[in-house]
Image (cartoon, rainbow, N blue to C red):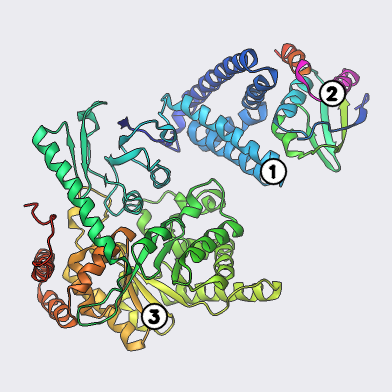
């Protein structure tokens, strides 16, 4: 078990003017502290390993004591009221980037030395020693205030059995990633760390979203049985891998996977998905401290396309806020009160057109290798869509002139995730090749609920009648115009919504890879007539609770009706 | 500027002016009061600054020009030339470390 294990999070970026002198003092003592520890390292390395190893720490110390470096950092603290952590991180990362860009592979590796220095300084400033997540030696459950998506992504799957965090919501990136990595996780349960001490036995129940501390023998026994049942259930579902998703009256439904990393394609294929309906590209921007190059984009896309072996993939362009992105995007970042309504996603791409073009070029080049579609997120107005398409047109022209191999007629679609876009779906449908409904954001914006805010998270209801109406508008508009429409987002991974979505006319879903077999299973238990009747009735209900209860009841009934002949050991839970 | 001294040197060692050599040059140069600069082609940097030195991106065999101006210019250039000629090996690093305050 681990406590609050995470890499450095800079607690605050700015300090008040009055505090500047005190902060400078704090920086000074951190410098001295690191300098002393480097001297100690240098001495030890010289004694034990030889002079040439000691010299490395000597060089680190030399960097640290460099007057220019110090002036730059102190300058930022003084003139911009940056916190020492933020100032040091920024200056050192600039140097690291400069080394990387020199084009000399040996010097590029020195960027790691600079980053190491940054870590030492931050550790001294924050006064904490963090256990390294990357050096786990035995199985653990991680309990932390917060895990960032990249920390989650880098968890060692062979050692980490599950995790729970105090902050975050169930549709946060961290939670989505936990699903992708198939890790039991409970995210955003509020304060609990103070109630636990290292060495306690902890059960993470990702299904019910509970963390049980110090369980009694009976509870332990119950969960051991659950774990066994879950295993045999997943074996049963695995048998569906080669079965096409069809309703039992023969209507074909495409069930695709949502992925974030190229490695997840294997999880989609293993579960018999019909391709990738949503490839989120944010990780290209998050993992490192520089904006991804065209080759980095291109290589990631090629890996996905090749692993799909002819199956389709829809690549979504950057869908992040300016504040979350390293490198030159930062110049666009402000400190908004409400980032969900701020400069993010397609808005950022349309502002930073150079970066946008880099991504589009890479997609068009990679598209030669398979069945690729481009999708723009967060489109709100027709002008935005037209502008994005115009930039795509420019990129096509550039590629043509440069003679690089690429595919020019890649289908272009949009996420429908802003209520404005849903309301104008009939107009948008004339200008795109497909829609994909992003229910997570659509619900958040339509119901004005921040899904990661624990205080209002229970108001976030996919079954709200307003959401059902928005879905119907979009699906009808797509049908009238004859373009395909998919639902991605967590609503389509939830079995109780499957009959509703099919009944509304959807024939394509994109779900978290883990849910593919279960979704196929539900589809197989439905007829179109059932689905349409369920959708009609659900549309007639007027509050979210009634809609959700009705849908839950229906899906349980449908699964039970045709399943009495099968022997299942997983339905005897309660 | 009255006592400007220049001398050219060739970068030894297969990795060129990487981290440790740069730190040794900066340490050694910092021991002198005068201005010391190193240039590769038209790119000239302060020899007392390790980050600037690394930005020279000087690989094995690069031709560099050392330039110093001020009272101890000759001594500074001689010390750096000796450092280049020694191939930045261990004993040079120890003597440089002892000189630094």
Secondary element under disc 3, as helix, strand or loop, is helix
Q: Residue at x 76, y 40 (%)?
A: B57
Q: Which residue is mark 2?
A: B80
Q: Assign the magenta stretch its main secondary structure.
A: helix
Please state the extent of the stretch shown in magenta in the rendering.
B70-91
Secondary element under disc 1, as helix, strand or loop, is helix
Mark 3, mark 1: which one is toward the viewer? 1
Measured Cα–Cα span from mark 2 to mark 1? 26 Å
Q: Residue A226 at what x, y percent from top left?
A: 16, 47
Residue A554 position (above or below residue A101): below
Horizontal relation, residue B85 to residue A257: left or right: right
Residue A209 visible? The answer is no
Q: Quadrant of the N terminus of chain A?
A: top left
Label 1 lies in what chain?
Answer: A
Label 2 lies in what chain?
Answer: B
Residue A481 position (above or below residue A446): below
Measured Cα–Cα span from mark 2 to mark 3? 69 Å
Residue A75 position (above or below residue A357): above
Label 3 environment density (alpha carbons within 10 Å; few <14, some 14–19, many ≥20): many
Q: Residue A154 at what x, y percent from top left?
A: 43, 43
Q: Residue at x 44, y 71 (%)?
A: A311
Residue B7 visible? The answer is yes
Query: Which of the two discs, 3 and 1, labels the residue nearer the N terminus?
Result: 1
> Is residue B85 located in the magenta-colored stretch of the structure?
yes
Q: Which residue is mark 1?
A: A105
Label 3 lies in what chain?
Answer: A
User: What number is the disc on residue A316?
Assistant: none
**Both labels 2 and 1 in a single chain:** no
Q: Which residue is mark 3?
A: A428
């Amino acid at each position: 078990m681990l406590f609050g294990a995470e890499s450095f999070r800079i607690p605050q970026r700015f300090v008040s003017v009055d505090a500047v002198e005190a902060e400078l003092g704090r920086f000074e003592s951190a410098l001295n502290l690191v300098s002393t520890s480097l001297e100690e390292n240098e001495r030890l390395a010289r004694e034990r390993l030889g002079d040439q190893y000691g010299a490395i720490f000597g060089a680190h110390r030399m960097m640290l004591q460099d007057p220019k470096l110090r002036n730059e950092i102190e300058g930022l603290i003084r003139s911009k009221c940056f916190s020492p952590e933020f100032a040091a991180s920024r200056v050192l990362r600039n140097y690291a980037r400069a080394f990387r860009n020199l084009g000399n592979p040996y010097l590029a590796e020195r960027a790691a030395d600079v980053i190491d220095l940054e870590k030492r300084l931050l550790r001294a400033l924050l006064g904490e020693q963090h256990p390294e997540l990357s050096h786990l030696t035995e199985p653990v459950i991680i309990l932390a205030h917060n895990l960032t998506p990249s920390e989650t992504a880098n968890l060692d799957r062979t050692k980490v059995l599950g995790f729970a965090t105090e902050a975050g919501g169930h549709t946060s990136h961290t939670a989505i990633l936990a699903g992708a990595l198939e890790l039991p996780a409970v995210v955003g349960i509020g304060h609990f760390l103070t109630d636990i001490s290292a060495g306690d036995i902890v059960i993470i129940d990702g299904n019910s979203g509970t963390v049980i501390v110090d369980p009694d023998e009976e509870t332990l026994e119950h969960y051991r049985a659950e774990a066994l049942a879950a295993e045999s259930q997943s074996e049963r579902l695995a048998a569906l891998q080669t079965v096409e998703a069809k309703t039992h009256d023969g209507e074909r439904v495409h069930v695709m996977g949502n992925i974030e990393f190229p490695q997840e394609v294997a999880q989609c294929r293993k579960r018999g998905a019909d391709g990738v309906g949503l490839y989120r590209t944010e990780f290209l921007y998050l993992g490192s401290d520089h904006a991804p190059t065209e080759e980095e984009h291109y290589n990631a896309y090629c890996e996905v396309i090749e692993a799909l072996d002819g199956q389709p993939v829809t690549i979504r362009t950057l869908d992040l806020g300016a504040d979350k992105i390293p490198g030159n995007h930062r110049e666009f970042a402000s400190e908004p009160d409400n980032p969900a309504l701020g400069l993010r996603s397609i808005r950022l791409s349309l502002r930073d057109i150079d970066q946008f073009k880099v991504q589009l070029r890479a997609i068009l080049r990679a598209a030669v290798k398979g069945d690729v579609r481009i999708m723009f997120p967060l489109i709100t107005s027709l002008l935005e869509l037209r502008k994005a398409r115009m930039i795509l047109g420019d990129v096509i022209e550039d590629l043509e002139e440069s003679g690089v191999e690429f595919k020019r007629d890649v289908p272009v679609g949009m996420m429908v995730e802003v209520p404005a876009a849903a309301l104008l779906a009939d107009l948008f449908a004339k200008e795109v090749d497909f829609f994909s409904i992003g229910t997570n954001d659509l619900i958040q914006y339509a119901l004005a609920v921040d899904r990661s805010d624990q205080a209002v998270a229970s108001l976030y209801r996919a079954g709200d009648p307003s959401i059902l109406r928005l879905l119907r508008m979009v699906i009808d508009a797509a049908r009238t115009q004859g373009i395909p429409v998919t639902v991605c987002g967590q609503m389509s991974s939830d079995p109780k919504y499957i009959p509703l979505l099919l009944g509304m006319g959807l024939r394509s879903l994109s779900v978290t890879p883990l849910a593919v077999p279960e979704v196929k299973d539900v589809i197989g238990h439905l007829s179109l007539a059932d689905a349409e009747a369920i959708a009609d009735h659900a549309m007639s209900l007027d509050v979210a609770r009634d809609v959700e209860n009705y849908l839950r009841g229906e899906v349980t009934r449908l699964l039970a009706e045709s399943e009495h002949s099968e022997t299942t050991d997983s339905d005897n839970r309660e | 500027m009255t006592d400007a001294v220049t001398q050219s040197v060739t970068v030894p060692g297969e990795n060129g002016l990487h981290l440790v050599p740069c730190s040794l040059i900066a340490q050694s140069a910092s021991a002198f009061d005068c201005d010391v600069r190193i240039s590769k082609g038209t790119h000239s940097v302060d020899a007392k600054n390790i980050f600037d030195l690394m930005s020279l991106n000087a690989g094995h065999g690069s031709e560099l020009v050392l330039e110093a101006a001020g009272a101890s210019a000759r001594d500074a250039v001689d010390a750096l030339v000796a450092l280049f000629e020694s191939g930045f090996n261990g004993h040079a690093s120890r003597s440089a470390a002892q000189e630094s305050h």
